[in-house]
């Protein structure tokens, strides 16, 4: 019984140690989705945001793996290095895609006053 009490005390004391975490902010210019044209399949492909890295890079994925694109820190859809770039959005900047009407904006919900 004493061992169990000591174990709980140890866990409780570790839980109270403050962590040195820094609050991260979500990049404001990242869209919810990217729309690309596939010349080979003659179809539109939509990729939705999947992950955002600490450096601001974002990965977009489409249904069934039809689109897997990375928005790099320079805000360009990176051309894939492991397969042919079969979609017209690769190599384009966010500004170019926005001008083409190819971005789905991320709708932010205002926080309620505390």
Image (cartoon, rainbow, N blue to C red):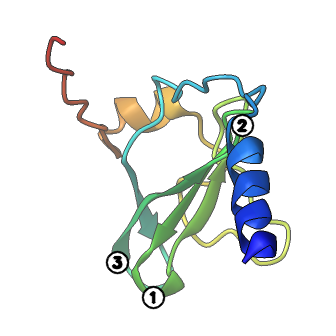
Q: Disc 1 designates what residue?
A: 64
In the rendered structure, are the residues bearing label 3 and label 1 in contact, judged by CB atoms less than 8 Å apart? no
Q: Which mark is residue 5?
A: none
Mark 3 residue element: strand
The image position of residue 89, as x and y in percent, is 53, 53
Q: Quadrant of the N terminus?
A: bottom right
Q: Give 94 or 30, whichever is nearer the viewer.
A: 30
Q: Give 5 or 108, whichever is nearer the viewer.
A: 5
Q: CA distance from mark 3 to mark 2?
A: 33 Å
Q: Disc 2 designates what residue?
A: 54
| Mark closest to the chain's N terminus, 1 or 2 | 2
Query: Which quadrant of the view contains residue 75?
Result: top right
Query: Which quadrant of the view contains residue 46?
Result: bottom left
60 relative to 93, above or below: below
In the rendered structure, are the residues bearing label 3 and label 2 in contact, judged by CB atoms less than 8 Å apart? no
Which of discs 1 and 2 lies nearer the camera? The answer is 2
Q: CA distance from mark 3 to mark 1?
A: 14 Å
Q: Disc 3 designates what residue?
A: 43
For the point 38% across and 80% down, the residue is 42
Q: Quadrant of the C terminus?
A: top left
Horizontal side of 15 relative to 101 (left or right) equals right
């Amino acid at each position: 019984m004493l061992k169990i009490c000591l174990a709980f005390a140890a866990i409780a004391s570790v839980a109270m140690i403050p962590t040195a975490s820094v609050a991260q902010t979500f990049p404001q210019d990242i869209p919810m989705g990217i729309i690309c044209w596939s010349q080979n399949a003659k179809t539109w492909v939509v990729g939705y945001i999947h992950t955002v890295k600490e450096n601001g890079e974002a990965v977009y994925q489409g249904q069934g793996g039809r689109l897997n694109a990375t928005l790099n820190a320079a805000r360009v859809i990176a051309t894939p290095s492991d397969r042919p770039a079969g979609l017209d959005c690769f190599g384009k900047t966010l500004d170019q895609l926005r001008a083409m009407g190819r971005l789905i904006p991320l709708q932010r919900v205002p926080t309620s006053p505390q």
